[in-house]
Image: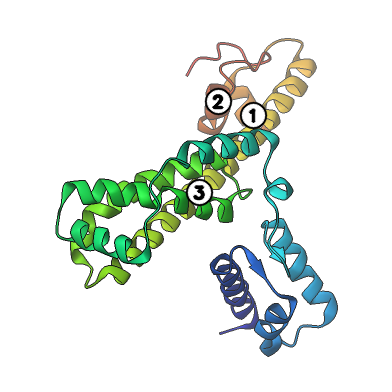
Amino acid sequence: MNQEQQFANTLEEVRRLAKNQGNCIGREQVKEAFLPLGFDEKQLEMVFDYLEEQKIGIGEPLQPEDYLSAEEINYLESYLESLELLEELSPGEKEAVTLSAMAGDYDAKQKLIAIYLPQVVDLSKLYAGQGALLEDLIGEGNVALAMAVEMLETADDAAEAQGMLGSMIMEAMESYIALNVQEKETGNKMADKVNRVADQAKELAESLGRKVTVQELAEETGMTSEEIWEAVRFSGDAIEDISSAEA
């Protein structure tokens, strides 16, 4: 394994450790993790900067106001208020409900979902500020929770079943964030392409004294006609200097 791969793996391990510790990690834990790579203080500070950008507290957990918008804070307060009426169970009662749900009891499954709704909120706060709204993360987590309770018969005991619930909730949130980031990157790339096509069409149109065709623009710029039509369609046919802009 080269140093670049080792760095990426170590960074991911540190990030996951922080998640498991309530989105918080100690400076010494980070230094110990990167010790095999021989990082100096300057390099470690870059790691700490990255972790802070990921909304991970260094030394102590971040407060919601440190990484949530005012709208998200208001939503969180309102949502938590709606959960206050949920019944609180002792660990023994929770285990009994879990075992009944594992056995296929419908009422137990519904009760288990209710029990885990606050945990969905706690987990969502670990992923907030990473490319998805808190409300959407909670929604994804709740859907995953409802799906997970239908799969508990595969678990060997209550502890494994409860671990499965938490894992599936976290995986759903991580997948949602990854998809959101990918869609945003795709949108940004398309926006850049639209701007590039529009600028080049304007430049060519000014030199010709008229609107240009897609074929003329393709020949002038070296772009393919397909690329130009894609940009035209993405713009909603709003690139004014291209004539007959219809896909």
**In this picture, residue 192 sits left or right of residue 215:** right
| Residue 13 position within the rendered picture, expressed as x and y whole percent measured from the top left | 57, 74
Give the image quarter of residue 210. Answer: top right
Rendering quarter of residue 61: bottom right
At 22% across and 52% down in the image, what residue appears? 150
The x and y percentages for residue 108 are 22, 51
Query: Mark 3 or mark 1, which is nearer to you?
Result: 3
Instruction: Report whether 113 appears left or right of 54.
Output: left
Image side of residue 200 versus residue 181, left or right? right
* Residue 222 appears in the picture as rendered: no
Mark 2 crowd level (few <14, some 14–19, many ≥20, 10 Å Cα): some
Residue hosting label 3: 121
Kind of residue at badge 2: Phe
Instruction: Kindly state the secondary structure of the residue where label 2 is placed.
Output: helix
Ranked by sequence position, the earlier of labels 2 and 3 is 3
In primary-sequence order, the first of circles 3 and 1 is 3
Q: Position of residue 125 (x, y in %)?
A: 57, 51
In the figure, 25 relative to 195: above or below?
below
Estimate the spatial distance between the alpha carbons at disc 2 and disc 1, rounded to whole Å. Answer: 7 Å
Circles 2 and 1: CB distance less than 8 Å?
yes
Q: Nearer the viewer, mark 2 or mark 3?
A: 3
Q: In the rendered image of this protein, does residue 114 appear above or below residue 165?
A: above
Q: Residues within 10 Å of mark 1 (few under 14, many from 20)?
A: many
Residue 234 image label: 2
Which amino acid lies under the numbered mark 1 shown in the image of this protein?
Answer: Val
| Residue 33 visible in the displayed image | yes
Q: Cβ–Cβ below 8 Å for labels 2 and 3?
A: no
What numbered label is drawn on residue 32? none
Q: Which residue is mark 1?
A: 194
Q: Residue sitting at 81 percent across and 71 percent down?
A: 45
Spatial distance from mark 3 to mark 1, Cα to Cα?
Answer: 39 Å
**Mark 2 / mark 1, whichever is N-terminal:** 1
